[in-house]
Image (cartoon, rainbow, N blue to C red):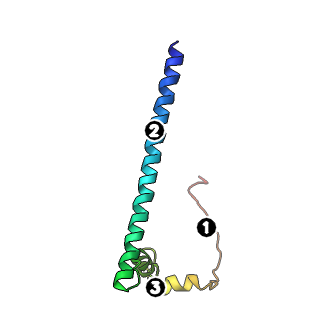
């Protein structure tokens, strides 16, 4: 009998958690749709195009090197597909032989 009761409680808990997750997902979707509609209405009333701030910031930072201190010349040379010829030499570890 206790296993039956525990299964019922587990089912009820799972149902409650799935319900909360569905309510959360639907509320996020609804909030994003409302913000999108408000942005479109604002652009219609003002006559200006919507300003995609996130993409503008991304494009501004995409032209910079990925780490601070790197010059733009070094970053652009690696992107252009230049081949760098280097001399290969073997490095021996004398400490490991003793």
Would residue 25 appear left or right of 98 to someone viewing this image? left
- Label 3, label 2: how many angstroms apart (C-alpha)? 51 Å
Q: Residue at x 49, y 35 (%)?
A: 15
Q: Residue at x 43, y 74 (%)?
A: 67
Would residue 88 appear left or right of 55 to someone viewing this image? right
Of the numbered discs 3 and 1, the one sitting upstream in the chain is: 3
Residue 36: tell me if it is visible.
yes
- Label 3, label 1: how many angstroms apart (C-alpha)? 32 Å
What residue is shown with label 2? 17
Label 1, residues with CA under 10 Å away: few <14, some 14-19, many ≥20 = few
Residue sticking out furthest to the top: 1
| Residue 74 against residue 34 in the figure, above or below | below
Label 3, residues with CA under 10 Å away: few <14, some 14-19, many ≥20 = few
Within the image, what quadrant is residue 64 found in? bottom left
Q: Nearer the viewer, residue 78 or 57?
A: 57
Q: Nearer the viewer's eye, disc 3 or disc 2?
A: 2
Q: Which mark is residue 72?
A: 3
Q: Which mark is residue 91?
A: 1
| Residue 50 against residue 37 in the figure, above or below | below
Q: Nearer the viewer's eye, disc 3 or disc 1?
A: 3
SS of the residue under disc 3 = helix
Question: Do labels 1 and 2 touch, CB within 8 Å?
Answer: no
């Amino acid at each position: 009998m206790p296993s039956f009761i525990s299964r019922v409680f587990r089912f009820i808990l799972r149902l409650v958690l799935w319900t909360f997750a569905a309510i959360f997902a639907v509320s996020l979707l609804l909030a994003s749709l409302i913000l999108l509609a408000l942005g479109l209405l604002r652009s219609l009333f003002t006559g200006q195009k919507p300003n995609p701030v996130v993409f503008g910031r991304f494009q501004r930072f995409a032209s910079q090197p990925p780490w601070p201190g790197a010059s733009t010349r070094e970053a652009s040379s690696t992107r252009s597909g230049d081949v760098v010829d280097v001399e290969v030499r073997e490095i021996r570890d004398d400490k490991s032989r003793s």
